[in-house]
Amino acid sequence: MLCQHSQASAEGRVYRDRVEPHWNSQGTSFWYRNNLPHEGRQFVLVNAETGTRTPAFDHTKVAAALSGILQRNIQPDQLPVDSLEFPREAAGPWRLHGSAGVFLWTPESQQLQQEAPGDSASMNLFLPPAPSGDSSAETEITLTNKLTFPVVMYWISADRQERRYQTVKPGETCRQHTFSSHVWLLKREDDSLIGCCTATASDNTWNLTEQSLATVSQREPRRARRSRPPAAQQPENPISPDGIWQPFVREHNLWLRNLSDQQELSLTADGQPARTFRRDAQRARAIGMDYEKADYPDQLSDTVWSPNSGYLLALQTTQVDERRVHYIESTPADQLQPRLQSYPYLKPGDPIPQTIPRLFRMADRSEIKLDNSLFPNPWSLDFQRWSDDGTRFWMLYNERGHQRLRLLEVRVADGAVRAVIDESSETFIHYSSDGKMELRWLTGEKVLWASERSGWNHLYLYDLNSDKPPQTVTSGQWNMRRIERLDENTGRLWFFAVGIVDGQNPYHEHFCGVALDGSGLKVLTEGDGMHSIEWSPDRRWFLDRYSRTDLPPVTELRTADGRLVTHLESADATEVIQERGRLPLRFAAPGRDGTTMIWGLLHFPRDFRPGLKYAVVENIYAGPHDHHVPGEFRSRWGHQQQIADAGFLVVQIDGMGTAWRSKAFHDVCWQNLKDAGFPDRIAWMRAAAQAVPQMDLTRIGIYGGSAGGQNAMAALIWHGNFYSAAVADCGCHDNRMDKIWWNEQWLGVPTADVYERNSNRENAAQLQGRLMLVVGELDRNVDPASTIQVARRLVQAEKDFELLVVPGAGHGACETPWASAKRIRFLQQSLGAPQ
């Protein structure tokens, strides 16, 4: 987020790239504002019914009228207007809001007049400061300081931290990029509080006046995300629907309290600390990485009533010893002496908390034994829902090792259990991805389910009251990426897909629609790029925004069925291109099999000279949970451009073993993380060097962080004849040292040789080339000991390498300014300058 004043920014900017529609009440028209060079702006009106796109008003006439009213020269593209308001009556005037006040523009008479200032012109402030909300919707603030003293802008993070941005002088207007629901705090220069305001998705014209100071509202403090809720907000034991019973836990056993006479009855006698009926928080801490998660109250059960109050399902949890990772914080902020830190962190192969479902009949308070043969070894076992008549309920069983996923139906009359959906894989089920772990309940006890059983990720509709095979909703050699909306009334589904448009990058996301019976599949977007959409309020139209790394954003208006209404904007990235030179080159070439296309990017230095040969540096991250080469346009590239500008050609490649191609493409990673797609990466670079002869493949370096740190070192262990230098930051150099959920997803439960075979630590003696290991001493994502252990193995093997421990840094330590500068110097010394 960058505050930009009236003078042009020193950095190149992109214009016409964000169309933020402001619809009228009928949902037939909208206006938006274009930002132009030299802090210019343009207002556009779009009639969705006719497809016309015109200026929202005559900018030249409004500029002339404003010049007369304000007694200063106003240019048509420099109007002091930030936002518009549609006429409140059919023939009424438009309201033009801005730093100079509110003006009324009547199109018929072409007249402009100033509206008398009122309280509405002043921004409304509140105290005390509240944490920012979580939103990805970009927006912009226009703050005008109409006070007699400077004010300082602070952004408030989700954990209530203040970050200073800019001082706004009296009479000055500041434009500030931000996100919807983000909170901004204003202070005097003496650090005393003025008040806060929250950005919205639409108009953020903030006029700070004396009226603002006089009307600061006092709010109840809002708790930050992830903070522990106050006691009054703690979850409570559920009361039966008939209002008679409430379960609770006493000494780890399950009890019932009759709310009419307060009589208490024991349902179990086998509870103990290691097998408790108390709601579990250990999994969230040790597996979910919510390290500070507090235990639930001793009496809080994990129970669910049937709709008719006839049955109570209780989840008993086995507790395990909580492995903790320890590290030394060498330089705490509040004391001189070091501090020992620790946090719960289960690792592959560790015992995990497991759920045991227990079912009780309320008529006689007896237990109905459940057959557990279909859920013998759960990674997780999650209650889903009861049937409407209370005769059945469903649970989702994810078997440890992640090769079986079942939706289980339990019949309460006798405890019989059957698998209504039974998914299995010889490799892994990608349960940890939202798009691939899709279970959506529909009315009539139907389930929409995602599966890769066909070799691609697709949707299937199950009727749980029928023995018929599921209805295939989507199919083909492409992947359903994520659901945007499901409308049961019309029986239609909207979703994003990858690989669905032939001839385009298979990672490009397109917006699609299909009927739940599998008919009427239609790709609703066309442009060659990554797409995002925004619906009109009534979903009759949507804005389609698409871009590529070499194509600035294009915005179109389309009807709900995908018909193009009108082209709205093609972004202007001239300043960015002038500043940074060539945009990244998209390139595709066959991988290891000579057939499957591998996609990647090539970044050039700003001062690229075609007559020179450049060492090549790969930025690697081969984590199988996703694909990682960006597909959308970026006006700024961080470390990739920084390293390229140091005299290198930088490449990013998605090799086999990463997600969102075919299942076979993804399965290359199974028990084989050391592969990391290297055969594909090497083939890609050799092909790219034919197209870009400035690539010097005799000098190749590689760098990455986290899983990419593991990959970077692995390049020198298994492909040291191709790569000659590596910088490995915060790597999980032996997957037995890393978090349990991520590593068992790809490697399974540890066996005698699988983890060792993939370990940098165990294979360190094979290292060739120059290596820099980097680790932050406070890393709470990957155990820092993983880097120190592999360093010790290198010492034992008498390998020459560099070890950089960054004091006070956490995960991703190499992206701190000092460490990133060290990385560049290491690569320059190892690979040399352009020749």
Image: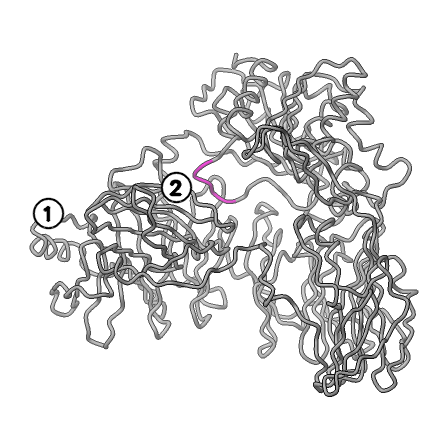
Residue 10, placed above or below residue 277: above
Q: Would you name the residue on which mark 1 appears?
A: 73
Local SS, label 2: strand
Q: Neighbour class for label 1 at 10 Å: few (<14), some, many (≥20)? A: few
Q: Amino acid at mark 1?
A: Asn
Q: Give x and y (percent) for residue 438.
A: 69, 62
Q: Amino acid at mark 2?
A: Arg
Q: Give x and y (percent) for residue 812.
A: 60, 34
Count up the numbered dots: 2
Report whether 58 appears left or right of 644.
left
Residue 651, placed above or below residue 213: above
Residue 276, placed above or below residue 191: below
Which region shows up in magenta? Answer: 632-636
Instruction: Specify the principal SS of the magenta part.
Output: loop
Q: Give x and y (percent) for residue 161.
A: 47, 46
Please name whichever residue, 517 or 732, is drawn nearer the observer in this view of the structure: 732
Quick check: can you spot residue 660? no
Select label 1 or label 2 by which is in front.
2
Please name whichever residue, 778 or 742, is drawn nearer the observer in this view of the structure: 778
Q: Neighbour class for label 2 at 10 Å: few (<14), some, many (≥20)? A: some
Local SS, label 1: loop
Q: Would you name the residue on which mark 2 appears?
A: 164
- Identify the residue at image location x=24%, y=58%: 55
Report whether 654 appears left or right of 375.
left
**Chain-order first, disc 1 or disc 2:** 1
Please name whichever residue, 625 or 535, is drawn nearer the observer in this view of the structure: 625
Q: Give x and y (percent) for residue 698.
A: 64, 16
Q: Is residue 633 magenta?
A: yes
Quick check: can you spot residue 437? yes
Q: What's the mark number on residue 333?
A: none
**What distance separates the C-alpha of mark 1 from that of mark 2?**
34 Å
